[in-house]
């Protein structure tokens, strides 16, 4: 199953929070004429969609995103959606830091017993005008775990950072799911081992490490790998 949204005709399932909407024929799309956008200087601003999915199934969701200069607190995320309040547990996400021209961002996740999730692309305003332009949003079913459980072929990986500013150490949190319960999970940054943890009873993991900031900022890529299964997660990026 593959579901796509090229934003040529805005789909009725999308809804917005704060500053967000759709453009058409303004020359801002990745391709064709339509795209979506999120923009703001304060508060939470997002483009959102609840979407029905199959239980015990692995999915990938991708979007072409263009990120503005000055963007430091954007997110591309998947949440549980048992309720319609948007406050479900984060399944996986990647933090968005600009600037970057249009490029593909991708998340992998497995659904467990869920039959609906919330997708969103959003940003926190930090006192200056920042934006995200969005095109070619795609949800694709990857594979189905074996009966009675199992894990997806590619575990997920998300990353977020907390920093007090230049000259201060930042905290980097790497998290995701898709490993065997209790499996040792190692985190690699730019292919160098950083820290290890163990997956919880549902195959999820979350671990932090400290890192110094730099000027100008640098880009880093992280991924997780299971020690016993040798499974390697999807990658996630961040700037510090």
Image (cartoon, helix red, strand yellow):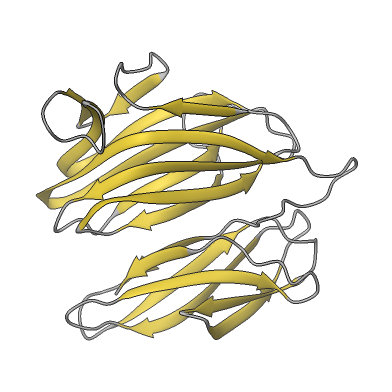
Check the image and name the residue furthest to the right: 148
Q: Residue furthest top?
A: 12
In this view of the protein, which residue sits in the foreground, 84 or 188? 188
Q: Quadrant of residue 140?
A: top right
Q: Relative to residue 230, is residue 203 depicted above or below?
A: above
- Position of residue 131 in the picture relative to residue 209 (left or right): left
* Closer-to-camera residue (213/109): 109
Quick check: 215 above or below 173? below
Which image quarter holds the N terminus? Answer: top right
| Rendered residue at 39%/41% (across/down) | 63
Task: Provide residue 125's location: percent of width, then percent of height.
Answer: 19, 47
Q: Quadrant of the C terminus?
A: bottom left
User: Which residue is rendered at x = 52% and y = 67% of the image?
Assistant: 174
Where does the image place residue 155, in percent across and percent down from the top left?
65, 57
Q: Residue at x 23, y 83 (%)?
A: 214
Indicate left or right for 201 with 48 as reference. right
Position of 148 with respect to 231 (left or right) is: right
The relative height of residue 113 versus residue 214 in the rendered view (above or below) is above
Residue extending farthest to the front is 32
User: In the displayed structure, does residue 219 sit left or right of residue 81?
Assistant: left
x then y, percent, for residue 24? 17, 22
């Amino acid at each position: 199953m593959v579901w796509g949204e090229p934003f040529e005709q805005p789909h009725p399932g999308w809804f917005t929070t704060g500053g967000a909407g759709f453009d058409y024929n303004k020359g801002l799309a990745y391709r064709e004429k339509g795209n979506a956008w999120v923009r703001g200087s304060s508060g939470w601003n997002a483009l959102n969609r609840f979407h029905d999915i199959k239980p015990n199934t692995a999915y990938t969701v991708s979007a072409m995103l263009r990120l503005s200069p000055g963007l430091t607190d954007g997110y591309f995320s998947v949440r549980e959606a048992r309720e319609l309040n948007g406050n479900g547990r984060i399944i996986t996400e990647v933090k968005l830091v600009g600037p970057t021209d249009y490029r593909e961002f991708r998340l992998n996740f497995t659904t467990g017993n869920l039959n609906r999730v919330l997708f969103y692309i959003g940003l926190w305003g930090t006192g200056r005008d920042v934006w995200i332009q969005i095109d070619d949003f795609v949800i694709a079913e990857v594979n189905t775990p074996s009966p009675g459980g199992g894990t997806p072929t590619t575990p997920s990986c998300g990353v977020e950072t907390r920093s007090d500013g230049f000259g201060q150490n930042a905290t980097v949190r790497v998290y995701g799911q898709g490993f065997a319960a209790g499996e040792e999970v190692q985190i690699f940054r730019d292919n160098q081992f950083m820290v290890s943890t163990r997956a919880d009873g549902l195959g999820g993991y979350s671990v932090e490490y400290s890192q110094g900031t730099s000027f100008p900022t640098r880009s880093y890529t992280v991924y997780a790998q299971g020690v016993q299964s040798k499974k390697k997660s999807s990658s996630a990026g961040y700037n510090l």
